[in-house]
Amino acid sequence: MLVIGELINGMYQNVGKAIKTKDKSIIQKLAKDQTKAGASMLDVNTGPASAQPKDAIKWLVETIQEVVDTPLALDSTKADVIEEGLKLVKGKAMINSTSADDDKLNTLIPMAKKYNAQLIGLAMDKKGIPRDRNQRSELALKIVSACMEQGFPLEDLYIDPVVLPVNVAQAQGVEVLESIREFKLLSDPSPKTVVGLSNVSQGTKNRSLINRTFLIMAVGYGLTGAIVDPLDKELMDGLITAELLLNKNIYCDSYLDAYKKK
Amino acid sequence: MAVDLLKEKWQNKVGTITIGATKAEGGTRASTVTVGGQSTLPFMFGEGDMPNKPVIAMEIFDIIPEEWPATLKEPFKDVMNDPAKWAKKCVDEHKAELICIKLQGTHFDFGNRSDADAAAAVNAVLEAVSVPLIILGTGDEEKDNKVLAKVSEVSKGQKCLIGDATDKNYKTLAASCLADGHSIIAESPIDINIAKQVNILISDMGLPQERIAINPTIGALGYGMEYAYSIMERARLAALNGDKMLSMPFVCFVGQEAWRAKEAKGPQSEHEDWGPESTRGPLWEFMTATCMLQAGGDILIMRHPKAVEETRKYIANLMK
C-alpha cells in the first residue's frame, strides 16, 4: 500500500503560517514525523491562499528534502506550479493530479513522462463529480486510454475514484468501493487506485473512526494507495492489519513494528 | 511463433552478511566471506543477479563426537581429538571456506566443559586456520549465555557468526555480538512467523540487519526437507517483495540433519539392500545440500568431505 502523508498542506493553519514566515522547523518536523509513522510518500500542497505558489512549492520541496528522502507527491491544480516542484525533486515523484479533461491530460501526462513521475488521475472532469460507478469507470477509462496513447507506463498511474463526504453524499460510498474493483478490469496491467481518504469524514463528528473504517473497507476492495494522516496511529494500525489479513504481509507477533521497518 | 518467457521483476534484494575480518579490518583472517545480495530466486540468472555464491562451512566439534557414525569419523579420525588440527585439515585438505565450531563439550551431557575451555578451543582454531569462523553453542540456554558471551569476548573483532539466538533467548547473545562486532544466527523451528519475529526482536536490540543470518531449521531428505524448502521459499519471496525482516541470508545445518537420518548412517549389515553406508551417507548429505541450495541456502554447514566436494562442484556448475 502506498501511504501518502497529507499533512504538508497550506490549507492547514500551521503549514500556511510556516510557508508565509519561511519557518523550516514546522515543515521538517511534519516530514520526519509522517515518514517515521509509515508514510511512503509525502503530499506537498502550497494551499489555496499562497500568493506565489511557485516560490512556495520550491521552498517546500527543498525544505523537506533537507531532512528526509521520502518521495514527494506534488499537489496543485496548476501545472506550472507542479513543474517547478518536479524540477527540484530528487527521487521518483508523483503528480497530484490530472482530471479526465483533455487539456489537463495533454499537459500533465507529457510532464509525468518527461520527469519520470507517477501520476494520479481523478475520475472527474469539468462537468463535475461523477454520480455513480459507471460514470467513474468511463472517466477512468478515458485517463487510461490517454496514458496508453501517449506511451505512459500504466504501472505509474493511480486512478482516484473521488471520495465524497458521507454526511452529504452517503450513497457515493459504495459507488467508490465498487469503482476500485472495476478499475482493475480497465487494462492489463491494471491502473493502481488511490483515494483522498479524509474527504469521506469531512464535517462529521467521528472523523477518525469513519476514515479508518472506510480505508479498511477500501483495502478489501483492492485499494493500492491512500492519501491519509499517517499520524493517526489507529488508522495506520488498522491499515497494516487489513493488509495482513489479506495475506499481503507475513504474520509475526510484532507485525505492526515490522511494517515500519520496511 | 516466437514465445516470450515470462520473467519476474523483483523490487528488492536479499541482504548481505560478511563474516571474518582481515588485519586491516581489525581481525586476523586472511580473507572474508560475503553471502547474500540476490535480486532473484536461487540461480534464476535471467531474472536478477546472484552476486555472491553460496558457501560451505565445515563443521567441527570441540570434543570427539562419539555418536557420529563410522563413515563420518573415518576422514577425521587422526584429528578429532584436537579442534585446531581438525579445522586445519578441513581447510588445507578439503578447501573449507569457513569453519563452524560447535561447542558440544560445554553441554552437561557431553562433559560440561567450562566457558574458559570453550574460549581456549575457539582461540586455538582461530590460530590454526585463517578462514572466517562460525561458533555454535549447544542450545542449552543457560550454558550458552555463559559460554557464548565468553567466546564472543575472546574473539572480539574477528567478525564471527555466532549462534543460535531464539525468540525465547536472544538478549544475551545479541548484546555480546553487538559489543564484540560479531554477527548472529537467528533460529526458528521451521516457522516463518517466528523467523520474522526473532529477527525483529534482535533488530530492536540494535543489531543491524546485515549482521543477522536466518537459521530456518531444516529437515534432511526424507525428514521434512520439502517443508523446510517451502518455508525458505516463502521467506525469500517475501524478501524479494520488500519484507526487510525476512531478507537476511540463510544458514542451513545440512550435515547435522542429514547424518541424523537412519538412511545416512545405518550400516549395510542391518540394511542389506541399502548398499554400503560409506557411499550412502555422503550422498544423503549431498542430496540434502542440493535441495537447500535450490531453496535459497547461502551458508551450508556440512560434515563429510565427499559431500562437501560434490556440493562445491554442484555450486560451481550452477554459477556458470
Image (cartoon, coloured by chain):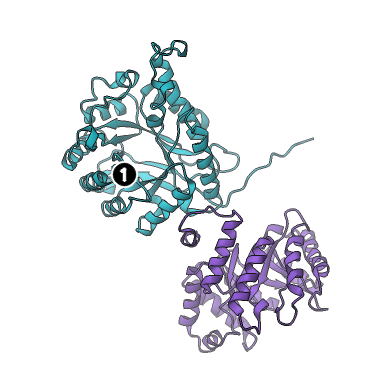
Chain colours: A purple, B cyan
- At horizontal 49% and vertical 27% (from top left) the residue drawn is B222
Q: Residues within 10 Å of mark 1 (few under 14, many from 20)?
A: many
Is residue A161 visible in the rendered image? The answer is no
Task: Identify whether A66 is placed above or below A259.
Answer: below
Judging depth in this view, the residue of B177 and B166 nearest the camera is: B166
Secondary element at image label 1: strand
Query: Residue B58, position in %: x, y?
Result: 34, 31
Q: In which quarter of the image is residue A189?
A: bottom right
* Residue placed most toward the observer, A129 or A120: A129
A34 sits left or right of B62 in the view: right
Q: Report x, y in % for residue B219.
A: 45, 33
Chain of the residue displaying label 1:
B
Q: Residue at x 38, y 20 (%)?
A: B265
Could you tell whether B87 is left or right of A58 in the image? left
Amino acid carrying label 1: it is: Ile
Left or right, residue B207 beside residue B297: left
Residue A230 visible in the shown view: yes
Q: Nearer the viewer, residue A234 or B51?
A: A234
Classify residue A4 as left or right of residue B105.
right
Q: Residue at x 30, y 21 (%)?
A: B73
Q: Name the residue under label 1.
A: B162
The quarter of the picture where residue A175 lies is bottom right
B34 or B219: nearer the eye? Answer: B219
Looking at the rendering, in which quadrant would you find the N terminus of chain B? top right
